Amino acid sequence: MATNTTIEHTTFRNPDMYWDIAADIYYPPHFDAHNSYPTIVSAHPIGSCKEQTSGNIYASALAEAGNVVIAFDASFQGASGGTPRFIEDPAQRVEDFRRVADYLTTLPYVDADRIGVLGVCGGGGYTLNAAMTEKRFKAVASITGVNYGRMMRETQGSNDAVIAALEAAATQRTKEARGADSAVAGMLPDSKEAAHDVGDIDIVEAYDYYRTERGESPNGCVLFENAHGASALGWDAFHLADTLLTQPLLVIVGDKQGAFGAYRDGHDIIRRAASKDKKLIVLENVSHYDLYDQPHGAGEALKSVIPFFAEHL
């Protein structure tokens, strides 16, 4: 993967916020602040952070190709501010994209008419949803994108279980309103052996990515705050895509299907999107986590992602 880039660590705050957003800006080779550049927003997966696939893989390679790229931490996660920690609220996650776009328009070297957006895993689902109402994004790429609301409902197993989860979230929120500490839960099994016992390829490879030297990061905690999780159970990343998702669209998935459902979601959003220019690429013998960092996954995806943005930005 590309390495010949300069990275600037930055924070910013919008007028509607009480916390900072942390981000890494990746500059192309021979960057000149007096010039104007196409710029891409890169969004991390659920439970992840900007230092992982959205930054060190996709942002780095896209910057090497001549773009300015900003990889940011979601509010309440990573190095960004906001409490309680580890909130995964779709409304806030989508609003973060607008906050980043606002910030980019204040930078003199960013061409505000050539901003694209890319997301990985749950970040891909949020990217698709954000682009429906944020038309400063002129081109959209989803890498193994997951509709987080759909995934969360399916994970419960039944509608009765969804209702029970909503009741539990309500109970926890009441406790915290009365002074109790925030409660968080992890998504991953406790050990490699436990992950293999589950048997699903997405769970096995999630453990390998987040809990080994392959991809682990201090801020890639894969933790979720319980009391504010109710909103995700009632959310659909693809709602209104048939009328509002109009930008050029590239969706890339692998054909090795797992519990997170990215393969199905990729086909679903391509079918539903109103975009006249839309393309689905299914990479053979590639899994969800291959598209995070592996040469035959992410490396192959970038062979399409880089020219896609070059054409549309």
Image (spheres, helix red, strand yellow):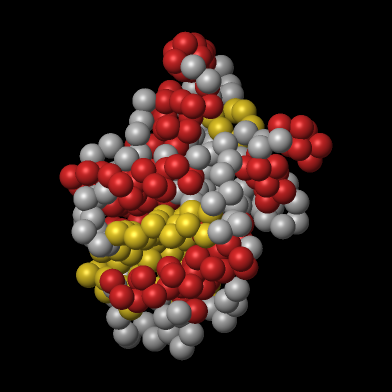
Q: Residue at x 43, y 64 (%)?
A: 70
Rendered view: 106 above or below 81: below
| Residue found farthest to the bottom | 30
Q: Position of residue 164 (x, y in %)?
A: 49, 11
Q: Position of residue 41 (x, y in %)?
A: 39, 61
User: Which residue is more in the foreground, 85 or 38?
Assistant: 38
Q: Residue at x 23, y 39 (%)?
A: 240
Residue 126 visible here: no
Q: Residue at x 49, y 17 (%)?
A: 158
User: Which residue is more in the foreground, 100 or 40?
Assistant: 40
Q: Position of residue 143 (x, y in %)?
A: 46, 56
Q: Residue at x 56, y 17 (%)?
A: 180
Q: Is residue 29 left or right of residue 290?
A: left
Q: Is residue 259 left or right of residue 71?
A: right
Question: Which quadrant does the N terminus fall into?
Answer: bottom right
Q: Position of residue 305 (x, y in %)?
A: 43, 68
Residue 305 visible here: yes
Question: Which quadrant does the C terminus fall into?
Answer: bottom left
Rendered view: 149 above or below 10: above
User: Which residue is more in the foreground, 104 or 289?
Assistant: 289
